[in-house]
Amino acid sequence: MRGGLCESAHRGAVAVCDADGALVLALGDVERPIFPRSAVKVLQALPLVESGAADQLGLGDEEIAIACASHNGEPRHTAVVERMLARAGLDLGALECGTQWPTREAVQRQMAAAGIQPDALNNNCSGKHAGFLCVACRMSGGVDLRRYAKGYVGAEHPVMRAVAAALQAATGFDLSRASRGTDGCSIPTYAIPLRHLALAFARVGTGVGLSAGHAAAAKRLRSAVARHPFMVGGTDRFDTRVMETVGERVFCKVGAEAVFCAALPERGLGVAIKIDDGNNARAAEVAMAATIEALLDLDDADATFMRGLSDLTLRNWNGIEVGALRATDALRDPLRGAR
Amino acid sequence: MRGGLCESAHRGAVAVCDADGALVLALGDVERPIFPRSAVKVLQALPLVESGAADQLGLGDEEIAIACASHNGEPRHTAVVERMLARAGLDLGALECGTQWPTREAVQRQMAAAGIQPDALNNNCSGKHAGFLCVACRMSGGVDLRRYAKGYVGAEHPVMRAVAAALQAATGFDLSRASRGTDGCSIPTYAIPLRHLALAFARVGTGVGLSAGHAAAAKRLRSAVARHPFMVGGTDRFDTRVMETVGERVFCKVGAEAVFCAALPERGLGVAIKIDDGNNARAAEVAMAATIEALLDLDDADATFMRGLSDLTLRNWNGIEVGALRATDALRDPLRGAR
């Protein structure tokens, strides 16, 4: 909103599902397969715990949390990823996610001011990839780990097969008939309907419909993230701020191109959102904030916090109020109905 | 596009007009008033030349070009703005646009590495504001310039009245009945239908329908920008690249929230585009590139260059091809018809 007009607008779809697959709410097309990108990192991290890799390597909560992360590449993040790799006897040379300047401009400037160039540790997916390498370590048996792990991002590598199997089991969607794309960090991404993504997150939040191993893994992953929400995002990030405030009542995870998934364990619900135009910061996040606010019974402080993420005042370079960013009634009204 | 699917999509509207106001092409709603933001800086710069301020202060082509700019705040830009202010006997303390880190991350990192903090000169609008201050200098008569110029961003200040009058004259749209918002740099922005914006740019390209003073000013502004396209954008910027390549055959200017205007003088046409969701980099620019490519008779090299801006391969952090960004047939087909 600016000057009393709607200046720009975002459209999308929202699915809210219970763990039995019943759709509690469907706005827009929830059957069209979409690439979930990083929104499903918690599902991709299930093998890390379920395989026994995390226990074998003695990973702590920070390492387990960062395996689910799209982090800012801040020093606290890169240190944990480096430590995780060291536990598997590896270093950043084993990462196949590519080098990336951290997305947050302030982090880039801090690095530039310190004369630091980015490496694969700064890639927002480096924690997930370190997790994959820990799985490779577990699977490799007596074979040389570096040789075994090489090409782990490929769809046919045993690590990526285990990741795809976990994704298929949680979503209940047959990936053999799914369109496959390549993600920003080079691993496969499979097109899955929002309805199935919401189902997977209802399962992650409740354990219902998962194998005993995956259910225990999901619980441990959620618990680790709840203890270290900074690890999954970082300074000023939506996921981090929400989980720091609301705690274990929400597990939420953003993905590229405005895919956003969440588990609301106390409601037994999973949420999956896709904004058509791919805008995360001012569309997927706003929609997710409105959804959490509507579906959870929050106290006043938490409700005010969430409302601050779905109904924002916009200020210009001089700090003058120039407009607003808000979830529309087209989203809020049906959410109230799903409450 | 990713993995054979359309991953994200952008919608919008396009108006193409001749200088008599005839609509050559209308896609989407071209009558809905939208805030043109920085896309109309060339219209806002008409008083700088028409008032005699540019001549009085001996402004050269670089200064005149940067008055139409949303620049990157690179050293070449800030030096020209500083010089322009000095010609009016002012310095950056007179700028009321606010302080902004340059939008381009690489420029931010260069500044951070050199230990430089941003100031108002780095604001992408600083050239436009320096132009306003030059107009204030011309208008101020014997009055102390700093006192006269103070509050020049206000809608009722004589400078901003002259700017609004030029905008109204060029667009033929009655601003007294327009919604008014505040722009990022604190000046008023008036909601104007795309059809009127396209008309204004047809007039800027031809002089038809403008006063003799505005027509001469428009010609000088276009010519200055054609000689110094770096000044209106900078390194790796769409406007700069297009005008460096195609020269005076196109005058194009992007604005915040995915508004994009262009004059195509040899066709006597003006173009105005608004993408609903406000995405510039991968929607407004792609649509403008497809429009220029369709409406101008380009040689093979220029056509290939323009096609490279409307049909792009996307690569990930490892340089692997992961998808494509392209203008759809829903845009290209009607443009072919308008040729």
Image: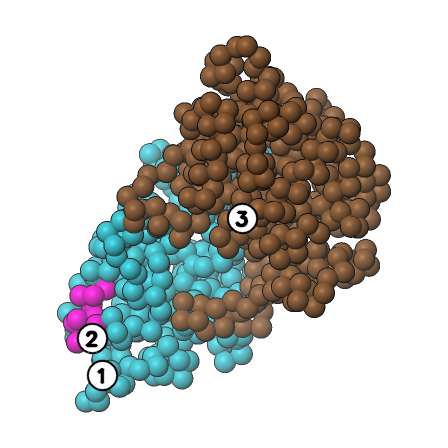
Chain colours: A brown, B cyan
Residue at image mark 3:
A230
Q: Give the magenta range.
A: B81-91
Q: Residues within 10 Å of mark 1 (few under 14, many from 20)?
A: many
Q: Residues within 10 Å of mark 3 (few under 14, many from 20)?
A: many
Q: Is residue A295 left or right of residue A59?
A: right
Residue at image mark 2:
B90
User: Residue B209 or A78: which is nearer the viewer?
Assistant: A78
The residue tagged with tag 1: helix, strand or loop? helix
What is the x, y in percent for residue B287?
49, 47
- CB atoms at circles 2 and 1 under 8 Å apart? yes
**In the image, what residue type sits under mark 1?**
Leu
In front of the other: label 3 or label 1? 3
Q: Is residue B90 magenta?
A: yes
The residue tagged with tag 3: helix, strand or loop? helix
Instruction: Give the numbered dot on residue B145.
Output: 1
Residue A29, by quadrant, is top right
Q: Chain of mark 1?
A: B
Q: For the image shown, how many numbered marks are present on the structure?
A: 3
**In the image, what residue type sits under mark 3?**
Phe
Q: CA distance from mark 3 to mark 1?
A: 51 Å
Residue in the picture at 66% in, 42% down: A222
